[in-house]
Image: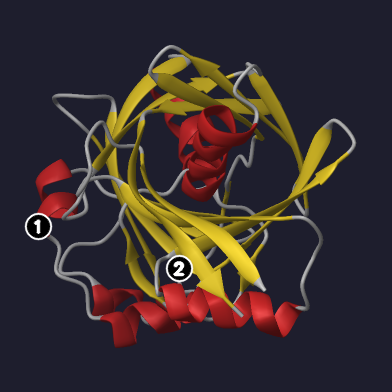
């Protein structure tokens, strides 16, 4: 069996920036073990798979270690592949996922994700919080897959050097650190060591949590965000109430084949 594969840098205007995702279009679903092995072999933060279902698509995402319920950058990368190689006449793609319906639109150079909002709620401080950070967060919140830690200094976010053994103990899935920014609306970084990704370069799904939080704090519906990882990426986020719109660019790095 030969499968096509695309590698796309999402939330990036040029290659070697943003967040690389592998995209594997399928005619029908393969068994979970094979899907996980492909993701492990790709060794990127996520590999996206999709299968056409009528006029819509089913989509799944896997890290090198496990399947995740939602992934923004690999959905943007999947939209890029569909718009440029498979569904060239379409302006919108509908994906059905474990997180519900996801809508992806293209508008000139930008691709916009329309995802469910995941507004965070306050939670108790994790036991090992003091060991992880030299300064303490001003707010501690959570929403399902993400622990959200808010700090009052964007330079701390940019310069923070994580101990992933300690980060791993803070939350069973993922940790976001964030602060208000002097140049954009907010900055963030995302750590996912328990899912096989120490630091995710640019995380669309995290912005379904960040956007409702900062929209309320800053009293703005439309926000500019920077994820300040080493590769970095810019996201344009819009709070639509029960839905979040996240826009960014993408750049094709590689196409190829998988031989099974």
Task: Name the element at disc 2.
Answer: loop
Q: Within the image, what quadrant is residue 191 found in? A: bottom left
Give the Cα distance between marks 2 and 1: 22 Å
Task: Identify the residue shown where x is 37% and y is 82%.
Answer: 128
Q: Within the image, what quadrant is residue 201 found in? A: bottom left
Q: Quadrant of the image for the N terminus?
A: bottom right
Task: Name the element at disc 1.
Answer: helix
Residue for badge 1: 159
* Neighbourhood count class around disc 2 (C-alpha, 10 Å): few under 14, some 14–19, many 20 upward: some
Q: Residue 50 carries which label?
A: none
Q: Quadrant of the image for the C terminus?
A: bottom right
Task: List x then y, in percent, for residue 120.
Answer: 58, 46
Q: Which of 192 and 216 is in front in this view?
A: 192
Task: List x then y, in percent, for residue 119.
Answer: 61, 39
Task: List x then y, in percent, for residue 109.
Answer: 38, 18
Task: List x then y, in percent, for residue 192.
Answer: 42, 69
Q: Which of 253 and 170 is in front in this view?
A: 253
Q: Is residue 130 left or right of residue 214?
A: left
Task: Identify the residue shown where x is 36% and y is 54%.
Answer: 20
Q: Is residue 87 left or right of residue 248?
A: right
Q: Which mark is residue 125?
A: 2
Q: Is residue 210 above or below residue 123?
A: above
């Amino acid at each position: 069996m030969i499968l096509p594969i695309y590698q796309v840098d999402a939330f990036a205007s040029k290659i070697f920036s943003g967040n690389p995702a592998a995209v594997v279009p399928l005619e029908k679903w393969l068994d979970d073990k094979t899907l996980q092995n492909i993701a492990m072999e790709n060794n990127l933060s996520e590999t996206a798979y999709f299968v056409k279902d009528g006029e819509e698509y089913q989509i799944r995402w896997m890290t090198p270690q496990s399947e995740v319920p939602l992934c923004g950058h690999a959905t943007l990368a999947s939209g890029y592949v569909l718009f440029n190689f498979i569904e060239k006449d379409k302006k919108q793609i509908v994906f059905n996922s474990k997180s519900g319906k996801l809508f992806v639109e293209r508008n000139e150079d930008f691709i916009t994700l329309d995802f469910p909002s995941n507004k965070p709620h306050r939670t108790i401080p994790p036991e090992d919080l003091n060991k992880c950070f030299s300064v303490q967060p001003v707010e501690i919140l959570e929403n399902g897959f993400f622990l959200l830690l808010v700090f009052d200094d964007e330079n701390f976010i940019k310069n923070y050097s994580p101990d992933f053994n300690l980060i791993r103990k803070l939350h069973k899935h993922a940790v976001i650190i964030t602060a208000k920014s002097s140049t954009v609306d907010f900055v963030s970084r995302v750590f996912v060591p328990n899912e096989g990704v120490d630091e995710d370069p640019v995380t669309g799904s995290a912005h379904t949590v960040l956007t409702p939080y900062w929209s309320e704090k800053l009293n703005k519906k439309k926000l500019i965000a920077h994820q300040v990882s080493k590769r970095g990426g810019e996201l344009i986020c819009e709070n639509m109430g029960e839905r979040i719109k996240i826009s960014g660019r993408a750049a094709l790095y590689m196409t190829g084949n998988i031989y099974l």
